[in-house]
Amino acid sequence: MTMHQVDLTSLDLNLLKLFEALVRERSVTQAGLRLGLSQPAASRALGRLRAMLGDRLVVRGKLGLELTPRGETLIEPVARLLEDARRIVAPAVFDPAAATGRITIAAHDHLSLLILGGLMARLERHAPALSLHIAQPSGDNVRLVEQGAVDLALGVFESPPGSLHRRHLYEDGFACVVRAGHPAADGLTLERYAALRHVAVTISGVGESAIDVALSALGLTRHVALKVPHFLAGAMLVADSDMILTLPGRLAERLAAVLPLAVLKLPLDVAPLSPSMIWHGRFHGDPAHVWIRRQIVDVAAAFDPVAPSGE
């Protein structure tokens, strides 16, 4: 049997870098800007990329460019090839002071509000030329990490795929916030808690709320008057109403420091949250990636202890 020989002289890694940028940006113009190309140059490069790989790779959809089936199958192998090429030519050590580029992290507003301040302070001090980008969340963000659309993700991940690594960051209990001067600000009983009008934050849109599960086990329900996708929006609405919001304890304290809110103990036994960080195996040994992960771990390690809910 004879094997079909591929002429490697036709392989242009710069065109594969364009494919990688298209996967992240889903826009020819934005992908070009990421690589320092003008829009016409990026369009010409896309034409050469299509010719090299024998497929259209991306087509226009309702929300921007969408990958063809062959384009989808190329995400992982192209990412691995480029990462291998980078490792071949990259220095073995990472110098934060000289580092440039962008770090992309997927995180919902809860962890962004808690982690970003400390992380940006560390970048300003040790790696001032690095920039940070928080990606638009997509469900639990696992798929973004798998596809290489982000460098890492922060969140609560029960069973991430085997291709991903996970590092526990900290544990947190739950607390409640109401507006300052709220009739319930002097303390909550379980019955009083259940009777209030609640703001509920839907983070990933997957699964049932741990609060509702715990109430149901006691034969109780709560009236969710409003659902929002962001804790900050929920807290601001609570500060101007008689509604109540249940949220992670550290975040409750952080928001109460800048909004007219009273923090109350949750009169319900709920398992604590265990936020963690996940990243793809192809970045596991990369010196720059290792350094960024260490900064995030150190930021989380500096958090003051928070008592679990129900204590």
Image (cartoon, rainbow, N blue to C red):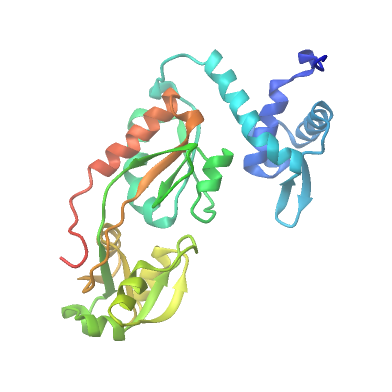
The image quarter containing residue 247 is bottom left
Percent of width and height locating residue 99: 45, 24
The number of discs equals: 0
Question: Which quadrant: the N terminus?
Answer: top right
In the image, residue 301 above or below residue 127 = below
Q: Is residue 180 left or right of residue 62?
A: left
Question: Which quadrant: the C terminus?
Answer: bottom left
Q: Residue at x 19, y 81 (%)?
A: 189
Q: Residue at x 30, y 59 (%)?
A: 251
Percent of width and height locating residue 51: 84, 29
Q: Is residue 207 left or right of residue 79?
A: left
Q: Nearer the viewer, residue 153 or 43?
A: 153
Q: Nearer the viewer, residue 32 or 61?
A: 61
The image quarter containing residue 202 is bottom left
Q: Residue at x 69, y 37 (%)?
A: 73
In the image, residue 36 above or below residue 209 = above
Percent of width and height locating residue 10: 79, 17
Observer able to see residue 241: no
Percent of width and height locating residue 269: 23, 69
The image quarter containing residue 110 is bottom left
Q: Nearer the viewer, residue 41 or 213?
A: 213
Q: Is residue 175 left or right of residue 17?
A: left
